[in-house]
Image (tube, rainbow, N blue to C red):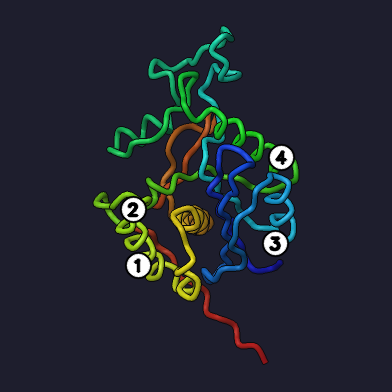
Amino acid sequence: MNDTVVFGVDLTSNESKPTACLGLDSRLQPVYLGFLAKDSEIIAIINIISPRVIAIDAPLSLPLGLSCLDESCPCQSESESRGRQCDHELRQQGIPCYPTSKKSFIKSLIHRGIELKNKLTCLGFQVIEVYPYASKVRLFGKTIAKKSTPQGISFLKERLGNLLPGLKPCLSMFDHNLCDASIAAYTGFLYCRNSVNVMGNKEEGLIFIPSSTPNFSLPERETII
């Protein structure tokens, strides 16, 4: 596919719960949206649309010093905070996030995220870590209703309709998972336009969030004769 495509993944902790996925082209038009259960299914769709960037909503790395999340293993984080620098930088900005440590309650999500990233990287794809809540704070402000409530869903759908007009025909079917997959994909789009800020360090792991003032223009739609 010649047109730039970004693929957002709101990853679940295991394959028993389907993962929301959404792809956008360079004009922010959807090229794929839906739920996929298995990693193999996610990879199969990615192979078909061949995105420039895959933006995954899940921790994709461990703190420096950790080789695993097994509490019986002697490996220890090099950081005094016992977590990643990118997570610490988010909290410094008043953006809470799940801990990436041996005490984490999202260990299964962390393991799945890292494994999926490694599989995709081996296939030659570029994979970045995103955090839709942080993206929403940057894009919409800190006053955001909980995404699991009717008010939160209405809030997200209204703003997604303005941010990504191409989604308007299908927003009625969106739940908060597809909303987060959309935000992940849009953050990947901003990454391609150099309109993101970077949290963390490259050696350990990075999280990309929208810059305070994204600056880009969409290409004009081509005339088909």
Q: Residue furthest left?
A: 143
Which tag, 4 or 1, sits closer to the chain's start?
A: 4
Q: Which residue is mark 2?
A: 149
Q: Amino acid at mark 2?
A: Thr
Three-letter code for the amino acid on which mark 1 is drawn: Glu
- Vertical arrangement, residue 137 with respect to residue 111, above or below: below
Q: Residue 158 has which mark?
A: 1
Q: Give residue 148's position: percent from left, percent from top.
A: 37, 50
Q: Along the polypeptide, which appears first: circle 3 or circle 2?
A: 3
Distance (Cα) linking label 4 and label 3: 17 Å
Image quarter of residue 68: top right
Q: Nearer the viewer, mark 2 or mark 1?
A: 2
- Whether the residues at callouts 3 and 2 have beta carbons within 8 Å, the answer is no
Front in this rendered view, residue 157 or 196 = 157
Secondary structure state at the residue bearing disc 2: loop
Q: Residue at x 52, y 74 (%)?
A: 219
Looking at the image, residue 62 lies above or below residue 31:
above
Query: Would you say 151 lies left or right of 11 here?
Result: left
Tell me the residue that label 3 is attached to.
Answer: 49
- Residue 95, position as x, y percentages in the image: 32, 39
**Residue mark closest to the camera, 3 vs 2:** 2
Q: Which residue is located at x 48 percent, y 22 percent?
A: 101
Callout 2–callout 4 Cβ contact below 8 Å = no
Amino acid under disc 4: Lys
Instruction: Please tell me the numbered disc located at residue 32.
Output: none
Q: Is residue 89 left or right of residue 22?
A: left
